[in-house]
Image (tube, grey):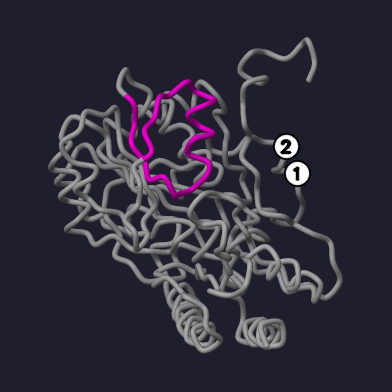
Amino acid sequence: MSRFWSRVARDLTPYVPGEQPKIANLIKLNTNENPYPPSPKVLAAIQAELGADAARLRLYPDPNADLLKTAIAQCHGVTAQQVFVGNGSDEVLGHAFLGLLKHEAPILFPDITYSFYPVYCGLYGVEFIQVPLADDFTINPADFCGRPNGGIIFPNPNAPTGCLLALDAIERILQANPDSVVVVDEAYVDFGGATAIPLVDRYDNLLVVHTLSKSRSLAGLRVGFAVGHPALIEALERVKNSFNSYPLDRLAIAGAVAAIEDEAHFEQCCRAVIACRDQLSANLAGLGFEVLPSAANFVFARHPQRDAGELAKALRDQSIIVRHFKLPRIDQFLRITVGTDDECQALIAALRQITA
């Protein structure tokens, strides 16, 4: 700490990203990256954007990323005026906190959820109330109805639990909160859920946030987007253009458009992840783990006789990295990213040995 720090910097508790260790022959199952490469069309598009030389990199990218907005709009059956894009969904969420959720009343989000939410609240001075999940770690929509709030945000599927909320339950929350923005963070929805994007034309208080990091295998390009009523999108644009007018570079825009347009590759990868997740869940259950039902590209599991921290350490000793959250209610769970079939088989073999 320095005397030059502002009060905001001094009082922040920053988000802690998943570890990116440099370990040889590592099986990395801790940050929910897609185990499969992006569409081959992504690399081709990036190479085409560079052209014969890289001289065009001296020029700023399109600040509005119109090509990408159009591709997203066509993919999801909305207009480009209903689409906002940013440097990963984290930036999109950050703009939503400042532009749509910073009001006089506290916002609501689950007590077990994406740990960036309270960080944004601290950064922007947003009051919040954490709504406890049910005993089975699901979101009870009734808990988000009938109480004053300055906005509501939750992931669907939830993170780190992987539990999915049905669209009719989301509609119940929207209908009960017509004067509050409801942000549905759908980072993992492509692995087993139904997106709420079709609801944006019926509810002007709904903002749906997506990322290309997970189902499109583009965590390295940092591209996220939101879909909502044009008035909500305008608020995000106002914040963006007061912060960074060029959040997406030329290569990210070109690669993201190609990824969005290659629907066949996207569907193939999602099917592979879902099949591997279901097999991983069954194998973990066979080893005595309790595994929460997951609609994401990860599973959340605990062993009744084994400490989660000790399991994580034992796996690390075998160069297998999973995520252990040392937080109330979930400190005995491990969040395990769905890897390739071979990676998941290696994980199960290691756990079988550790728990024997």
Residue nearest the observer in this picture, 74 or 315: 315
Which residue, given by chain and number where applicable, does mark 2 sit on?
A: 58
Q: Is 295 on the left-hand or right-hand side of 33?
A: left
| Image location of residue 61, percent across then percent down | 59, 39
Relative placement, left or right, of 264 versus 312 is left
The single residue placed furthest to the front in the displayed view is: 305
Q: Nearer the viewer, residue 121 or 70?
A: 121
Location of mark 1 (residue): 55
Neighbor class of circle 2 (other Cα within 10 Å; few <14, some 14-19, many 20+) is: few
Q: Nearer the viewer, residue 64 or 268?
A: 268
Q: Amino acid at mark 2?
A: Arg
Residue 82 screen position, x and y as percent? 30, 42
- Percent across and percent down for residue 106 are 34, 26
Q: Quadrant of the N terminus?
A: top right
Q: Residues within 10 Å of mark 1 (few under 14, many from 20)?
A: few
CA distance separating discs 2 and 1: 6 Å
> Measuring 18% from the left and 43% from the top, which residue is drawn there?
174
> Magenta stretch: residue 118 in it?
yes
Asked if the stretch drawn in magenta spans residue 19, the answer is no
The kind of residue on which mark 1 rests is Ala
Task: Residue at 51%, 32% (x, y): give it.
Answer: 120
- Region in magenta: 106-130
Mark 1 lies on a secondary structure that is helix
The correct choice, above or below, for 93 with respect to 293 in the image is above
Q: Are marks 2 and 1 in contact (CB under 8 Å)?
A: yes
Quadrant location of the C terminus in the rendered image: bottom right
Residue 246 lies, in percent from the top left, at 57, 33
When the figure is inspected, residue 151 is found, relative to residue 38, above or below; the finding is above
Between residues 42 and 28, which one lies in front from this camera angle?
28
Q: Secondary structure at mark 2?
A: helix
| Residue in the image at 79% along x and 73% along y | 319
